[in-house]
Amino acid sequence: MSTKKIGKFKQRLIEEYQKLVRQINRNRISEEEVLSERVIEEGDLATQSFSSELLNSLKEGDIQRLRAIEQALHRIDSGTYGDCNECGEPIHEKRLLAVPWATVCIECQENAEGQTSSRHGQLKTVGVLLDEEEEEE
């Protein structure tokens, strides 16, 4: 990938990083407001609890993405940005445009998702097909 394209990805990652920091700070302020509200009724308590849980989950997701962006910026600095962490092949530029902090190519991502699905019993037929293919050999 050209230095110019990497520079554009770096700028986009920095902008996304700054946006997330602002969002995390807003969420912290909102969480403090939710926690400081005076609870009068049980319904209010349920609403406050739900709001607090929602803000916590949003914050966790933002922090995970923030870490992923930090790692992507580190890969840019080390010269490994755009290379798949699994197979070492270049990550397609369209994928990086969609998810600039991506660490794996589409093929490796699909393989990882397939393994996760099979652990949950969603791909049991694949095992059957593989067993049948092995018998034919």
Image (tube, rainbow, N blue to C red):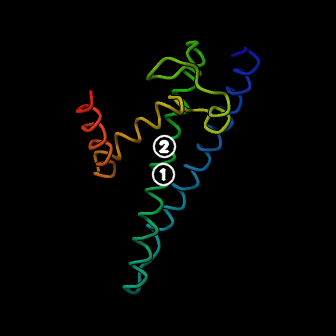
- Which SS class for mark 1? helix
Q: Is residue 20 above or below residue 88?
A: below
Residue beneath the point at 33% across and 48% down: 123
Decide which of 93, 33 is in the foreground and name it.
Answer: 93
Residue beneath the point at 44% across and 49% down: 60
The residue carrying mark 2 is 63
- Which SS class for mark 2? helix
Residue 94, image x, y percentages: 67, 33
The residue carrying mark 1 is 59
The C terminus - image quarter:
top left
Number of marks in the image? 2
Say which quarter of the image contains residue 49.
bottom left
Residue 39, image x, y percentages: 41, 80
Q: Taking 94 as reference, is 36 left or right?
A: left
Residue beneath the point at 26% across and 44% down: 128
Residue 32, image x, y percentages: 48, 61
Inter-mark Cα distance, 1 to 2: 6 Å
Label 2 packing within 10 angstroms: few (<14), some (14-19), many (20+): some
Q: Is residue 46 above or below residue 123?
A: below
Tag 1: amino acid: Lys
Q: Is residue 34 above or below residue 41?
A: above
Q: Taking 130 as reference, is 93 left or right?
A: right
Label 1 packing within 10 angstroms: few (<14), some (14-19), many (20+): many
Tag 2: amino acid: Ile
